[in-house]
Image: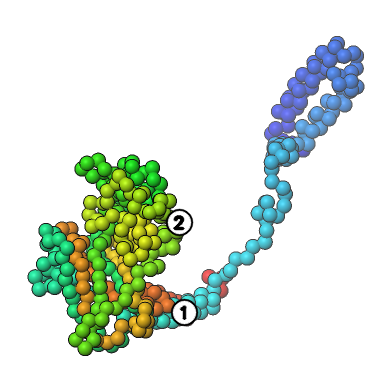
Amino acid sequence: MADGPWRGFYCAFAVSMYSMFMWKVGRGRKKKGRGMTGKGELLHPGKDLSVLLTSLFLCSPADCAIKAMVKHEQEESPNRPDNTAFTQQRLPAWQPILSAGIVIPGFVLIGLAFIGVGVGLFITSRDVQVLELDYTGAVATDPCYKCSDPSIKDCGCTMEFHLDTLFKGPVVIYYGLNNYFQNQRKYGISKDDNQLYGDLDTFKSPATACSPYDYDGKRNPIVPCGALANSMFNDTFRLYRMVNGSKKEVPLNGKGIAWWTDQNVKYRNPNETPLINAFNGTVKPINWPKAAYELDTTDVYNNGFINQDFLVWMRRAALPDFRKLYRRITKDEYQAGLPAGNYSLEISYNYHVLSFKGKKKLVLSNVSWMGGKNDFLGIAYLVVGSLCVIMSIVMLIVYAKFKFPEED
């Protein structure tokens, strides 16, 4: 039954609705014939009134609202998801209940695992041998001091060093630069990717991103253009081993030092034979001692935009202090490493860095299963593992002292 306070309202509403209903029925009789609706159904005024009053008196406002909502949902769009456990998100789920008996042993195991890995990484890193030779020439006592003057061209210097024990192989050689921001955005985009992919049309009209290293003073196009290519590192090194007072050159292998994707996907030489013909009407970058097609006079396949040293330089460093792979020592009797003794390093000094307070060095190193020397990684694992063990001890003390129930 309807609620008491609303009964009078419902009665009045029912009478008014019935009056309207009968008025419409009268109009329907005139149009469709006596006792028939527009649809041809018999009219029973008394019955219709009783049904209407019954539905109103038996339906409370809350029930009527629910019935209306159900009817609306049934008539909703066919795009409504199926009433299944998956679409209605009623699938059974599992949620772990973290208790002291689970958390504390878990922290201990994780901590011990991290400590074990950290010890292994740290010991391995300590076994990696590294020798750094700074040849910037910033101090008058340095062997390369005279070459640090930019006004001196084609300058060379020599550095001597001694190895007390075997420098285990395979030995790799890096050149390192300090305070050199290769990650500067304008510097990094100063190149023409289409030109570096071997598109001959861009040889005559370099991209505007290369400016001001797109044309020389006579409006001749520069290939490769841009600040990134123009600043390519061009110092060269030759290593000698001193044997019985004479110099014996150590062979340096420069093959395979660049990324495979750079050499085979990202950079391409023009389809022109000989390669020099593709560079007709162009000039070399301002700071280059020779053109791109003659970077390597000993290997015709190591010239142009797929030259190994050029590819290594074009892959920019993320930090201002970096080192890049220069050569490997893997041939002949040096496969096991560099024997103990005296060595001489001859440097062709072409790259000047003192103008921006930079430094440069040559680095000899060997590698392990984890790569080069990196103490930080092992220390980081040790710190995290130790913190996990300490936290487990603290939680164990708190649990033993307060004895929290399992529900907490």
Q: Which residue is mark 2?
A: 265
Relative to 4, residue 109 above or below? below
Identity, as a three-letter code, of the amino acid under mark 1: Ala
- Give the percent coordinates (x, y) of residue 201: 38, 42
Number of numbered discs visible in the structure rendering: 2
Q: Residue at x 23, y 57 (%)?
A: 289
Which-is-in-front pick, marks 2 and 1?
2
Residue 262 in view (yes/no): yes
Sooner in the amino-acid sequence: mark 2 or mark 1: 1
Q: Quadrant of residue 259?
A: bottom left
Residue 402 in view (yes/no): no
Q: Is residue 319 left or right of residue 18?
A: left
Identity, as a three-letter code, of the amino acid under mark 2: Val
Q: Distance from label 2 to label 1 (Cα)?
A: 41 Å
> Dot 2, how many residues are within 10 Å of its Cα: few (below 14), some (14-19), or many (20+)?
few
* Residue at disc 1, secondary structure: helix
Label annotation for residue 113: 1
Q: Residue at x 23, y 70 (%)?
A: 361
* Residue at disc 2, secondary structure: helix
- Give the percent coordinates (x, y) of residue 398: 44, 77
Relative to 187, residue 332 above or below? below
Q: Residue at x 12, y 61 (%)?
A: 152
Q: Quadrant of residue 263?
A: bottom left
Relative to 116, residue 213 above or below? above
- Give the percent coordinates (x, y) of residue 280: 32, 47
Q: Nearer the viewer, residue 178 or 39?
A: 178
Q: Is residue 71 left or right of residue 188?
A: right
